[in-house]
Image: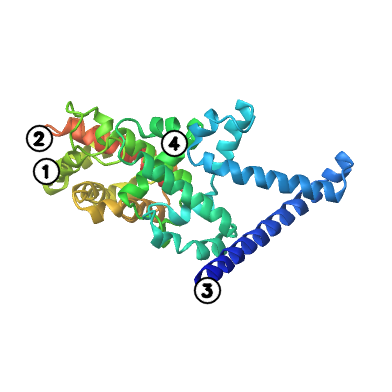
Amino acid sequence: MKTCIASGWMVTQVCVASSRKAVVLVNDAVALRVRSGILEQTGATAGVLQSDTMDHYRTFHMLERLLHAPPKLLHQLIFQIPPSRQALLIERYYTFDEAFVREVLGKKLSKGTKKDLDDISTKTGITLKSCRRQFDNFKRVFKVVEEMRGSLVDNIQQHFLLSDRLARDYAAIVFFANNRFETGKKKLQYLSFGDFAFCAELMIQNWTLGAVGEAPTDPDSQMDDMDVDLDKEFLQDLKELKVLVADKDLLDLHKSLVCTVLRGKLSVFSEMETNFKNLSRGLVNVAAKLTHNKDVRDLFVDLVEKFVEPCRSDHWPLSDVRLFLTQYSVSVHSLDGFRHQVLWDRYMGTLRGCLLRLYHD
């Protein structure tokens, strides 16, 4: 009997606490609406505004479980919401703050990361409630699509009804969480979520199994997920590129070809000529190390250390970086002793795009 009374008291306390929290949220929302001038615009009283806002909160509380699986919102009959409003509601619910996503990008979407949300809220100035919603959305989308075959963006759109742009952003978040790319190091803080999302899209298009259409013929095949996992065979093959820097004759010829074309076209030609071999070793060694999970995780750290920072310290303008990377990539096709042209193009085509995006202050 005492246990029942105690349990009932605890439930009551939880309900009271939840009710108080809801009242605080409603009061905050009412204050925002008052500041927007709604009382003057509508002629409503403060009491009516309070009641109206509370009604919206009650309705949203009932709607929120449907937003966890947006197709259910479309097919429910309880709430009469026009399709355009449904789309807006879904889009707003799954929208996230860039400051927040930068703090969790590439981290495991687990309870351990969720424990850090208090600190992230304090650091970013985003409310803890909003941080939790955004984190839970990331985790929910990840769990639904992580093992699906086919296009990651299409799967997200199909199951969460997001706009193309927002679905692509979520695809980047899922891709980074799955591959655990390091994004939090101090030297990477200048990079925005948009920078990483741009690179994620290139990598999904070119470095995953889905990029080369290697879908298994057996539907029960245990092959890795098409757009979420990097193509391990491709990563293994990248070791073949080491010959470009290990073979002195090839390295010298590559440098000669690039310098011949770019002489008189780069404002930093002498710096490029002096540092060519170091830059080339950096780019090729990054490729050769991608067979190890830790080096995959450190990809962006390595690109900034091996290429972005050296060029930045020599004050390369972006136009020179673009010219160099283009000629550096293309000239390999003129190396008679090199037999991995297709592999090189698949690697450098993506890397060039990423480096150009990463190269800014």
Marking on residue 168: 4
Element at label 3? helix
Does 265 sit left or right of 233 as displayed? Answer: right
Q: CA distance from mark 4 to mark 3?
A: 55 Å
Can residue 344 be seen here? The reply is yes
- Mark found first going from the N terminus, 1 or 4: 4
> Going 46% across and 64% down the picture, which residue do you hit?
116
Q: CA distance from mark 2 to mark 1?
A: 9 Å
Q: CA distance from mark 2 to mark 4?
A: 40 Å
Q: Are marks 1 and 4 in contact (CB under 8 Å)?
A: no
**Splitting the image into 4 quarters, where does residue 142 fall?**
top left
- Mark found first going from the N terminus, 4 or 3: 3
Q: Say which of marks 4 and 3 sits in front.
A: 3
Q: Which residue is mark 1?
A: 249
- Mark found first going from the N terminus, 1 or 3: 3
Q: Nearer the viewer, residue 338 or 218?
A: 218
Relative to 246, is 20 above or below?
A: below
Q: Are marks 2 and 1 in contact (CB under 8 Å)?
A: yes
Q: CA distance from mark 1 to mark 4?
A: 43 Å
- Mark found first going from the N terminus, 2 or 4: 4
Q: Nearer the viewer, residue 221 or 290?
A: 221
> Going 29% across and 53% down the picture, which residue do you hit?
297
Q: Which residue is mark 2?
A: 337
Q: Residue furthest front?
A: 1
Q: Are marks 1 and 3 in contact (CB under 8 Å)?
A: no
Q: Nearer the viewer, residue 311 or 262?
A: 311
**Splitting the image into 4 quarters, where does residue 91 fall?**
top right
Q: Which residue is mark 3?
A: 2
Q: Say which of marks 2 and 4 sits in front.
A: 4
**Splitting the image into 4 quarters, where does residue 204 fall?**
top left
Element at label 1? helix
Report x, y in % for residue 168: 44, 36
